[in-house]
Amino acid sequence: MNTKKKLLPIYILKILHKYSAENHKLTQSEIISYLQNEYDLIVERKAVSRNLSILEQSGYDIITTKNGTYLNEREFTTSELQLLIDGIMSSRYINEPHSRELVEKLSKLSSKYFIPHIKNIYALKDFSKTDNLELFLNIEIIDEAIDQEKIISVTYNKYGLDKKMHPSSTMILSPYQFIIHNQRYFLMAYNEKYQNMGFYRLDHITNTAIKNKRRTDIHSIPGYTHGINYKDLAQSRPYMFSDKTIQVRFLTEEWMVDQIIDWFGKEIQIQKKEDKIYVTLNVSPEAMEYWAMQYASFIEVIAPQSLRNKIKNNLKDALKKYEEV
């Protein structure tokens, strides 16, 4: 028996993986045809039938009916692949070339009938994507630095009037954790120069390098003596500002509760007095100021007074701009 015929079960499995589906069953004649066209193998029906039985006995979920044979169970179902691809397509931190590459790889985990379905639905140009081609390299380097507990140097970039990324500053950071938030990828790291914890957009980082110096112990940083509180991060930093959290109380309408929980989670206090809704939570004051401006028509910050005054002044300044002719 030649080498190709020894690999016959693998070739048949590959053909079933690529060309078969519940609504695209393959007859033995079609399998024989694919074997000849793709692997230059000429086999008889008995050989196909025998090797299908071997694959089934080996644990592969292969279904044979009077209309043909198909591979039933795969690494991912169609809906699971669809969900993964949706995530890649909508992720602003993955650039267009990498998005295309990942979608093609995921599509190959299903049959060939899944690929045109994806291409018919999506157009990458319809999505807002980063221009940073170093994202995946940055992830590898920073992940290694986190494992080795070393500091890193990075260039942080910002968009200019030409709509292109330009270097803004060089930073020395102690990296701790990657965080995905609001469809953006952040690096949680301690800025060695300014001595504060920050959340840095990974798609804005370039020129990442590991330095031969141990990072700052996170437990020595004020507010992180017990490490990272992920629930607190999710609730108190809807915009990933790095200032210290404070207790905020605001007045709102009942229909807004859905939006509030969506933004801040369930670890908040909600009280109803007569027809008024009072919400109390611990949150970044900068984030709350930004969020309160966004929902200015529907909420009123009651405390602390300093935050209430800032929002009040912001609204006055905004009103002046719209009153000017």
Image (cartoon, grey):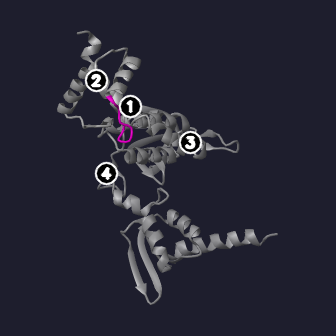
Left or right position of 23 against 55: right
Disc nearer the start of the sequence (2/1): 2
Image disc number at residue 256: none
**Residue at the disc numbered 3:** 130
Label 1 and label 3: CA atoms lie apart by: 32 Å
Label 2 CA crowd tier, 10 Å (few <14, some 14–19, many 20+) = some
Which range is magenta? 21-27
- At label 3, which amino acid type do we have? Thr
Q: Residue furthest left?
A: 57
**Residue 154: where, in percent of width, then height?**
49, 37
Nearer to the camera, 278 or 119: 119
The local secondary structure at tag 2 comes to: helix
Rendered image quadrant of residue 12: top left
Q: Residue at x 49, y 66 (%)?
A: 285
**Residue at the disc numbered 1:** 18
Rendered-image quadrant of the N terminus: top left
Q: Is label 2 in contact with label 1 (beta carbons under 8 Å)?
A: no
**Residue 314: where, in percent of width, then height?**
63, 69
Label 4 and label 2: CA atoms lie apart by: 52 Å
**Residue at the disc numbered 4:** 219
Nearer to the camera, 81 or 208: 81
Label 3 and label 4: CA atoms lie apart by: 33 Å
Q: Disc 3 vs disc 4: which is toward the camera?
A: 3
